[in-house]
Amino acid sequence: MLMEELFERLRTFQELLMERVAIEKEVRELPKSIAAQEEVLARAKKSYGERSQRFEETQSRVGQLRAELADVVAHKDKSEQQMDSISNPREFEALNKEITEAGLKEDQLRKDLKREEENLRESEGEVKSSEALITSQESEIAAKRTKITNDEASMKARVTELKGKETDITADIDTEVVFKFERIIKSKQGVGIVPVKGVVCSGCSMILPAQFVNEVRQSDKIVFCPYCSRVLFFQEGDEAQEDLIVDIESGSLADLDDYGDDSDDEYDSDSDMDGDSDKDSTDDSDD
């Protein structure tokens, strides 16, 4: 297989793998799309339990107050009926006091009952509100779960299809290369094969050794960047980059840091010229 064909296959494999990785991530994220609603539902159920308990307690208090009020009213009515048959002043005074106290107690019970009945109506409204929220959330969650199930099935079918294409495209490529390339793509945001421009890896922008660049230019084997591990292929650069490679190979380039930086040399030259001018001016003054 020609290297150019191999590189093209790796690029195709890269596209397929990028799509598959994205879908697999989306599949993992699907359950999270209803997580917020499930949390709302859980809180609503907890609130419903608390509100139901409060409603039952209030309902019980209302029942007790109604029973107590009925007893007081009945006792008061009975005492009032007895007033007509009493002739003894002392008994009359005692019974009158009893009726007065019963009347006061009746008034207080009616106030308490009115307050608790208002609480009961409010509590009943809260319970119904919680029930409505729970019903709504359960309905929405059920619909979303159905959609998630359908989407997940569709996505997994696409993943299976992509894996089949990946197997076909990498059938006669070294399995170790495929494994390493796949790992690179997953860790390098989907970019696993990049060009060498001049002596620089375009994936990580690191300067590569001249001998290593020559290996890439020969295109007779898969070469991985020693810094970012991406697969490399050579891309012709401009004349300056080509001259740099020649300089590196001939050993005439002392320091790669000076590559492309002519400003310092110009500055030094200008300084030397200024120095010579100053010296000439001094000599002239001495004459």
Image (spheres, rainbow, N blue to C red):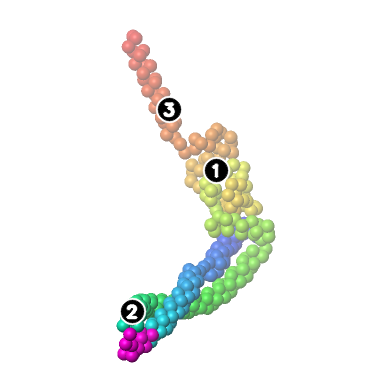
In the picture of the structure, the residue carrying the numbered disc 2 is 97
Q: Residue 191's image quarter?
A: bottom right
**Amino acid under disc 1:** Ile
- Left-right relation of 23 to 275: right
- Which residue is rendered at x = 36% and y = 86% of the image? 79
Q: Residues within 10 Å of mark 1 (few under 14, many from 20)?
A: some
Q: Residues within 10 Å of mark 2 (few under 14, many from 20)?
A: few
**Amino acid under disc 3:** Asp
In the picture of the structure, the residue carrying the numbered disc 3 is 268
Regarding mark 3 in the picture, which secondary structure is present there? helix
Regarding mark 2 in the picture, which secondary structure is present there? helix
| Marks 3/1: CA–CA distance | 26 Å
Q: Residue 15's image quarter?
A: bottom right
Residue toward you, 96 or 158? 96
Find the residue positioned furthest to the top.
287
- Mark whose residue sits in front, 1 or 2: 2
Question: Compared with residue 69, is residue 207 higher up or lower down, i.e. above or below?
Answer: above
